[in-house]
Amino acid sequence: MASPMFFLLLLQSFLVSTSATSTTSLLNQTETLLKWKASLDDQSQSFLSSWVGNNPCNNWVGIACDRVGSVTNISLSNFGLKGTLDNLNFLAFPNLIHFDVGNNSLYGAIPSDIVNLSKLTFFNLSSNGNFSGNIPKDIGRLSSLTVLDLAWSQLNGSLPVSVVNLSNLSYLAVAGNNLIIILFLHLNSFTGPIPASIGNLSNCQWLYLSENELSGSIPSEIGRLSSLLQFQLQGNRLNGSIPQEVGMMRSPYLLDFSSNSLTGSIPTSIGNLSNLVYLYLYDNKLSGSIPSEIGMINGALLSLQLSENNLTGVIPASIGNFTRLRELYLSNNSLSGPIPVEMNNLTTLVHLQLRYNNLVGNLPENICLGGFLTNISAQNNHFTGPIPKSLKNCSSLIRVRLEGNQLDGDITEAFGIYPKLDYIDLSNNKLYGEVSPNWGLCPNLTSLRISNNKVSGRIPPQLAQATQLNGLDLSLNQLSGEIPKEIGKLTTLVYLLLNDNQLIGRIPPEIGNLVNLQQLSLARNNLVGPIPDQLGNCFRLLQLNLSNNLIEESIPSEISKIFALETLDLSWNKLTGEIPQELGGSRVLEILNLSHNKLSGFIPPTFDELKSLTYVNISYNQLEGPIPLIKAFLGAPFNALRNNKGLCGNATGLPHCLSKSQKKSSSGLVILIITPVLGVLSLLFILVGCLLLVRHKKSEMKERQFQDIFAIWGYDGEILYENILQATEQFNSNYCIGSGGYGNVYKALLPTGRVVAVKKLNLSDDNQSINLQAFESEIRALADI
């Protein structure tokens, strides 16, 4: 991790890494040093008069050694030395750590063999003034180097790219040379602010500081980077505003400040960057409007990316000046107003992203006039009007997203044939017309979404020719006719959504060929016939919704083969028969809705294994017996279980199930009074007496009586009343078995199999007390039977 001072002096600190090759330690260090001394001028030699004898570790000026007598330090700065480094063989010093000859009068080339000094940490040649040639291209091999000072040495060429490999470097000085500086400092872990000294890099042409952890604001001194061609600061933690001085740089053709936390407005001075070709300011917190001065940038601008900010106001008409623009990204802002007509000048656009704004009016009519557009993304705005005519013959299209607007018009002929089209979404608009068979002629189409519009007509069987389709959503429209069997040829389909239409006919068994299908919704149509057994072949299916149709017959056991099934909704149909016990094998099933059908019999005991089930609704069927002992059933509200034939269990609103001993006894007397209001002046009381033949003692019968009363009382009163009306055909006289003082007695066979006697009493306001008295007397008489 570099310190915040890594840019001190001339922004000369950065990190890099390499490995260095060890050199032989057998060369005579003494001979090497003396040979170099002899190559210097006479005055320089006099400064090194202590260099005598055979041991440089013995008081030689500027020389230091380790314990084993190997030279580790050569420090000769400010000695007035004059000469070259040609005769200093660096291979003789494999353990050299420190080499400092700064502020002398050395000249010539930097020896290339210095790159082999794998232990070197400090290297200073600064302020010599007459070095020539290039910095060794493999200087990046000095893997231990922490300080590299080459400033004011008249070096030529460029800063080697390998310098980015110096992973331990904390200080770099290269000013005062004739270098073309390319600083690749990206993808490191630099922290702290960018120092003002960055402005000293007047010769720097490429400055890459991206993908670090730099913080603070961008210093105004960047305006002094007069030679800069590319400036990349993306992917840091920079904040504050973009300084107005950015417009003083003049030279850059690429400016990338994206993916930071920059605030404030886009400076108007950015219009002064006449050579700019790429401007990336996306993914910040910039606010205010897009300055009209931006249109002053040279017409050579190819990419303008301002997405994911807090920009407001209208799109300036001056953007129409960028007649060569290829990419315009303005998405995820709060821009408003209509698209300026000048945008029709942008006929070379390849990518247009306007999504998630508050834009209104029509889309640009000439958006694909040049035939280059591949990606248009304008979803979730307030656009109105028809689909732009230029899109019909835009064969370059790959991705189209126009959903979530208020587009209208007939789409029957609005689109053509697109050989490259991969994805199109027109959902949630006001489009009408029919689904064009041309979509089947788009060989690379993977997703077609036209849901929640006003599209009518039939589903064209030609869609089956789009064999790469993995998503088809035509839901929430006005489609009619049958589901074409050819749809079974789309074997790559992952989701098929045709719900909320007016489709008729049977579910084609060919849907069973869609082995990759994960979501199938045909709900809220007018489909008839049985559920095809072949659906069991869709073994990857996660969600199956066939609700609100007219589907008949029984639930096929083959559905249990869909082991991945999480949601099954077959409600509001005409399904009959029993629930297949195999369905209990759907161990990942979470949601089950079988309500409003005509299912009968017992709930299979295998349902006790549906541990993943979180929601269940089996109401309005003819089911009976105990409910499964799992949380989804035991915690279900009564509305999810109501209106069945005779369910029992420990759930809200259900009676407790009878024990085995209770089931053996079929005797007892049940007295039930229901008093629905029939009008202001009359009430209907219904007495239910269930008189069964018994072989037990009268005392045992009375004991059972009390328990049975509560078993019957557990019925929903409205259901029981409806069952009585149905059993007596609205109290038809054919079912009358006698009469009393205040009403007739009827025989009724309930769906539970019980035969009951029902007394219907009419109660008037004048003799209410008398009727109630007689009513109690007749109850006692029935109880003695």
Image (tube, rainbow, N blue to C red):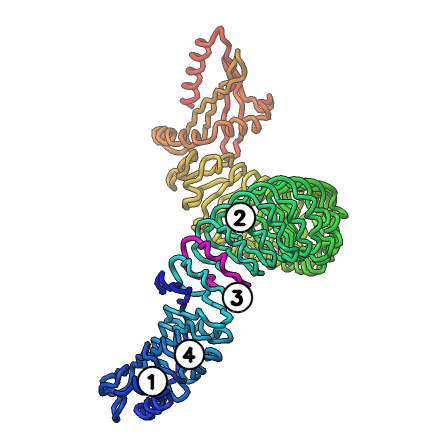
**In front: mark 1 or mark 3?**
1
Residue 669 vs 410, above or below: the answer is above
Residue at the spot 30% in from the left edge and 84% down from the top edge: 47
Inspect the image, locate mark 2, and give the three-letter code of the amino acid beneath it: Ile
Which of disc 2 and disc 1 is earlier in sequence?
A: 1
Distance from the alpha carbon under mark 2 to that under mark 3: 24 Å
**In front: mark 4 or mark 2?**
2
| Residue found at the far top of this picture | 766
Inspect the image, locate mark 4, and give the three-letter code of the amino acid beneath it: Arg
Q: Is residue 21 visible?
A: yes
Which of disc 3 and disc 2 is earlier in sequence?
A: 3
Secondary structure of the residue carrying numbered label 1: helix
Residue identifier under label 1: 44
Bounds of the magenta segment: 206-231
Q: Is residue 496 visible?
A: no
Task: Determine which of the numbered discs, if any, sits on residue 141 in the image.
Answer: 4
**In front: mark 2 or mark 3?**
3
Residue identifier under label 3: 205
Secondary structure of the residue carrying numbered label 2: loop
Secondary structure of the residue carrying numbered label 4: helix
Inspect the image, locate mark 1, and give the three-letter code of the amino acid beneath it: Ser
Q: Percent from the top left, x then y, of residue 773?
A: 42, 12
Residue at the spot 51% in from the left edge and 40% down from the top edge: 618
Which of disc 2 and disc 4 is earlier in sequence?
A: 4
Q: Say whether marks 1 and 3 touch (CB < 8 Å).
A: no
Distance from the alpha carbon under mark 1 to that under mark 4: 31 Å
Residue 312 vs 207, above or below: the answer is above
